[in-house]
Amino acid sequence: MTDELQTIIDLIRYGASRFNAAGLSFGHSYDNAIDEATHLTLHALHLPHDIGPAYGQSRVTLAEKEDVLGLFLRRIEERIPVAYLTGEAWFAGLSFNSDPRALVPRSPIAELIENGFEPWLGDREVRRALDLCTGSGCIGIAMAHYNPEWQVDAADISDDALALAQSNKSRLHADNVRLLKSDLFSALQGEHYDLIVTNPPYVTNTETDALPPEYDHEPELGLRAGADGLDLALKILRDAPLHLTDRGLLICEVGEAEEALARLLPELPLAWVEFKVGQMGIFVADRHDLVTHHARIKKLADKRP
Ligand SMILES: C[S@@+](CC[C@H](N)C(=O)[O-])C[C@H]1O[C@@H](n2cnc3c(N)ncnc32)[C@H](O)[C@@H]1O
């Protein structure tokens, strides 16, 4: 049945059709079937992802076709995200190792990093930055890569995630990154940062239980965050002022838990970042505001497990 498939473009078109027919969930690295099929095909053929369109008409050998179709089959039958099949994910224009030890990098914070966190940083000088809940290390390592003069700490509670982050630190020669094992700020006593960036777990329990099978391949520790998705974010809001310099900034992703947070803390001035595609549940808070509203934040956070 696949005898008619002869060229690279034939394979990509076929993969995309099968992915759509199988009702796969997209959104880990790519948001559509054609991009996923393209990426898997080029990976199996050992070709760069920016190959010119003319190569689409190149014919493939039988062995190459089997390799490509084998990857398509695993994507469909096992629902493995593309990044875990290829072992690679792109984030902020950089190539990271990706495997089930940590979530596939996909945070919109990449756009902020590439824009130098403007306009949020303004005239603030950053010497030390923290990526809390670093997972694969993507945020901290990308910040360090684009700002070689910064000293970046990247912390996670998971040994598995930290091992993957270590491989990415080596891969990207990020000598200005220090990896630390820490339950939120617990191992960071006395440390102060001009910028704290964090993409903590923020999926509600109900949503976590209903996620498509692709998410079963990711560590649940990176997703589940209580009844309203705010178990970790509230503790970060509570403890961040202790670890921010005077004019320090906290940038935190809470995704769809944005509404719950705004309901719980309507008086806290949070600036919700506008991305090219609109708001993505990422806020910026300055230390001063977190201190002003600390009592209320602490009361809410202390109730969390
Ligand atoms: C949503 S993932 C984000 C990973 C990475 N920053 C990214 O953007 O792809 C959340 C990460 O938080 C870590 N984590 C969960 N609970 C934590 C805790 N109490 N302290 C530190 N890290 C935690 C998980 O291990 C996971 O790597």
Image (cartoon, helix red, strand yellow):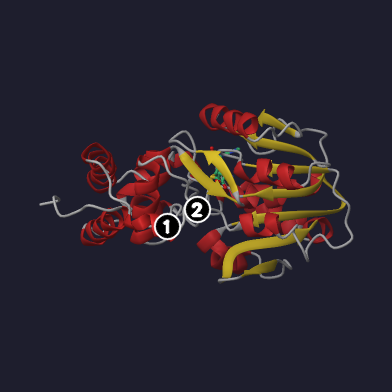
Q: CA distance from mark 2 to mark 1?
A: 20 Å
Q: Visible in this render: residue 163?
A: yes
Residue to which mark 1 is pinned: 27
Residue kind at label 1, given as amino acid type: Gly
Does 127 sit left or right of 110 as displayed?
A: right
Does 281 sit left or right of 154 as displayed?
A: left
Residue in the image at 47% along x and 50% along y = 49
Near mark 2 (Cα within 10 A), the count class, few <14, some 14-19 or many ≥20, is few
Rendered view: 300 above or below 265: above
Relative depth, front residue between 13 and 135: 13
Residue in the image at 31% along x and 58% along y = 9
* Disc sitting over residue 50 in the figure: 2
Ligand 1 visible in quadrant: top right
Helix or strand or loop: what does disc 1 sit on?
loop
Using the rendered view, name the quadrant where residue 261 is placed.
Answer: bottom right
Residue kind at label 2, given as amino acid type: Asp
Residue 35, position as x, y percentages in the image: 39, 58
Relative depth, front residue between 136 and 215: 136
Residue in the image at 24% along x and 43% along y = 65
Does 210 sit left or right of 184 as displayed?
A: left
